[in-house]
Every structure is written in C-alpha cells, then in structure tokens.
Image (tube, grey):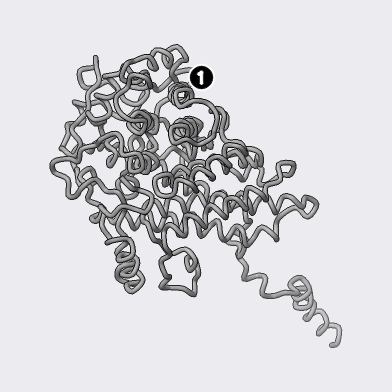
Amino acid sequence: MKKLLLLALLPVVTLVACHKEITSINVDPKSPLTYPSAAFFTGAQKNMVDLLTSSNVNVNIYRLIVQYWNETTYTDEANFDLGTRQIPRQIWNGLYRDVLRDFKEAKKLYPGDTDPNSPSQLKNRLAITEIMEVYTWYYLVTTFGNVPYLEALDALKTQPVYDDQKTVFNTLLTKLDAAIADLDVTGDSFGDADIVYGGDVEAWKKFANSLKLKMGMTLADDDNAKAKATVEAAVAAGVFSSDADNAEFKYLGAPPNTNPVWVDLVQSGRKDFVGTNTIINKLKASDDPRLPWYFTLDGTGTGYSGATPGASSNYATFSKPSGPLLVPGSIGAITNPDFPALLLSYDEVEFFLAEAVERGYSVGGTAIEHYNKAITASILWWGGSAAEAAAYLIEPTVNYLTATGTYKQKIGEQKWLALYNRGWESWIEWRRLDFPALVKPPTAQSEIPVRYTYTVPEQNLNKANYDAAAAAIGGDLVTTKLFWDKN
C-alpha cells in the first residue's frame, strides 16, 4: 500500500521540482517586462526623423507653409488651418511622448545593459542621448515658445508649469556643452543601435558642435554677444566640413522603415500635392540644376510649372514633388522608399558660417567662400555636378556680388532653396532671416504662422499654466513672434 501511495505522488513531486518558481509560468516570453535601452534610443531617433520628414497633413505641413508644395483638392492646410486636424497636438505629442519620453527611458536603462569592461560606453551613451534631447527640445521651443520643461515627462506632474522659452534655450546650450565635454572619442557607444552615425563618437562630436553653431545663430538677433561667443566656440571645436559629416538617416526599401514621403505620396496612392509657382519660378529663373531633382515635368511633358499657393490645383497640370527615379550613384527621387532624411547638413553649416562672417564673428573664411560652398554642397548632394554648381554660382541672381539685397536676403533665399524637403527647418530659417519674402495666399485663414498655437488638451486640462504661458509670450496666436524672431 505504501508503494502504491509513493507511485501516485511521483508526478506531483516531479511537477513541483520542475517549477520551483510557480509564478514564472505566468510570464509571456513574447511580451517582456523590461526592454533593452537600445530599443528606446533607436525608436526615439526614428520617431524624430519621421516627424521631421513626414508630409502627412495631420502632422507635418511645413512644406506648405514655406510654399514648396501646394495641395490639390483640400487646401485647408495650405491656407494655414492648424486646428481642424489638431496639427499642433500631433507635433506636441510626437516630440514629448514619442521622442523625449523614450530618450528619458533609455537613459534610465543604460546602467543595466552597458559593457562593464568599457567604462566609456555608458558615458558616451548618456552624452549622445543628451545631445539628441537638446536637438528635440530645440524644435519644441522654436515651434511653440514657452513650454513645460522642468516639470515635463514627470508622471506625477499632470499639470506641468511652462518655462520661459529663452531660459530653456540657454539651459539647452549649457546641457549641450556638458554633453560635448563628456564625449570620449576613444570609446564606443551604441554600435548599430545608433541609426544615424552607427555609434561613431567622433561623428557625434562634430554633430554636437554643428548643433551648437546652429543654436548660436538662432540667438543672433536677440543676444549678439552670446551668439558670437557660442558660434566661435563651436567652430573652434570642429563643425561639419563636408557632406560626409551629414547627420543622415537612410530609410530602407521595404516597409515599415521606409521614407515617409514615399508612404504619403506613393504607397498611399493619393494625389494631394504639386509644386508651387513660388519655388518653381525661382528655380527656373536662375537655371537651378536642382529643379529636375525637386520636381517632375508638368502636364505638357516639356517644362515645369507650379500652382498658386493656397488655391485648388489640378494634379495633372502641374509639376509634382519627385525627381529622377533611377540614376546610378545618386540618391534618387524624394519619392523613393529609401530616400535618406537629414537631421543636420554640411550645406546648412556653411550657410551659417557665411552669415557669421557678415555679422563679424571670427569663424575663418569669407562670406562668399562659405556661401559658394553651401550651394555647391547642396547641388552635389542632390545629384548635380561640380560643373553645374559652378555655372549656377555665376548666375547674376545667385552670384554673391551681384544678387539683390542684404546678406540676409542672399543667404535666406538660397538657404530656402537648399532646405527643400526639410520644411520644418526651412520654416525656422525663414522666420529668422525673413527671406524669401513669401506672400500669404489670398484665401489664407491667417498671416503666415510664425509659431504654433498650444494644443487643445493643454488649454482644457492644464488651463492655469496654459493661460500664464499664453500671457507671457504675448498671446497664444500664430502671429506671436518668439524671443529670437526680432524682425
């Protein structure tokens, strides 16, 4: 009888022995409770690039604001209707929730999954993430003005206070300096988890100094002394010196990691956008070699033409956003699934340097030299040749010695052309330099926006702080200029 009892208990004993921690059977191995820090860092990078590059009218309408593109049938966004689709909310949520929050989470996890035999790895990861956070905050502050900063991303602060935009901006510069100082170019960082530079710390150092240059120039009309010191320090430390330094994200040829412009214009099958006569006429007037890279031929098949901004347009009639589809050795068309996106570029840096020289900053070279380098770099990046760039630079309307206007007009107009496909960046520079002299559509709902209004949830759920922020900046209006936008 005892033997029979023992035999009966054997399966139970065996089962208990195999599952000493009985609760582990409730853990889903396909849904882990923790994630590697790299997943958050990579995801935040990708989300930031997508926000900058998207042409989705629910999210990114900057190409319409600066009059690169026009809508064909539904022209609300080209006429500056920001409210119907709650576009400010999409930008606000995208930067706070999908970018900054993930960077914050990544930093919390780094100590647990860095190589203990590589003491510089943790330091470099934290510094690079800080640089990307500064980059993200830059877009928040230059888009909205006062924003929640010190109390942002705190789950216990459901109604965060808004911080003064200039104070936040200067704090970001301090954080950027500290991050640059923490970079150890002899050590490693992220490896392939970094989808911009592949973990190259030296490249990130150049990026950070170029970002510092950019931020310094943004301050130039508000605080010239600080701008001068910031710019000169950045240049002395080393900024981009060729297109090889570009902060470039290479999209893939197959979903889901494809170029958002391809997703919006090709995969969707929609026919929503054509070029505007504002940019196409400018490109044609100076025989700009980038014209066939920016747009297709129009409906005649023999030339290029653009629609009037804000007006309903016939898709078949006008040139469309695209370019050569198959050109060996080139980056191809902006409607290709694998067309790359830029976070910061060499031509952008050279335009800043040309302006810095004109402002009397000690950055080396002449304004003409930097201006010519900027335009040449842009043409070469898009697929043009050195000969085409040289011919373009002697056009009377382009040549720095004969082009019309002040240095702000010369640089502003050419920078606007070079920043095509980077509408958000172009909008910032248009507000800063006040060129080109864009004219609002006759059917526009407002003046051309110089900031985004705060989101509806903020107005309703964080009303006291929203009201204080709106009053502090001079009103929650698209016409309220931010602290650095003086003219």
Query: Which quarter shows the C terminus?
Result: top left
Residue found at the very far left of the displayed protein:
442
Q: Secondary structure at mark 1?
A: loop
Residue found at the very far right of the displayed protein:
3
Residue 218 in picture, x, y percent from top left: 43, 45
Left/right placement of residue 351 relative to residue 272 reads: right
Closest to the observer, 295 or 36: 295
- One can see residue 253 in this view: no
Asked if 235 appears above or below 230 in the picture, the reply is above
Q: Residues within 10 Å of mark 1 (few under 14, many from 20)?
A: few
- One can see residue 438 in this view: yes
Closest to the observer, 465 or 362: 362
Image quadrant of residue 112?
A: bottom right
Asked if 105 appears above or below 405 in the picture, the reply is below
Q: Which residue is mark 1?
A: 329
Report the residue at 66% width, 46% height from top.
190
Amino acid at pointer 1 = Gly
Report the residue at 34% width, 46% height from top.
60
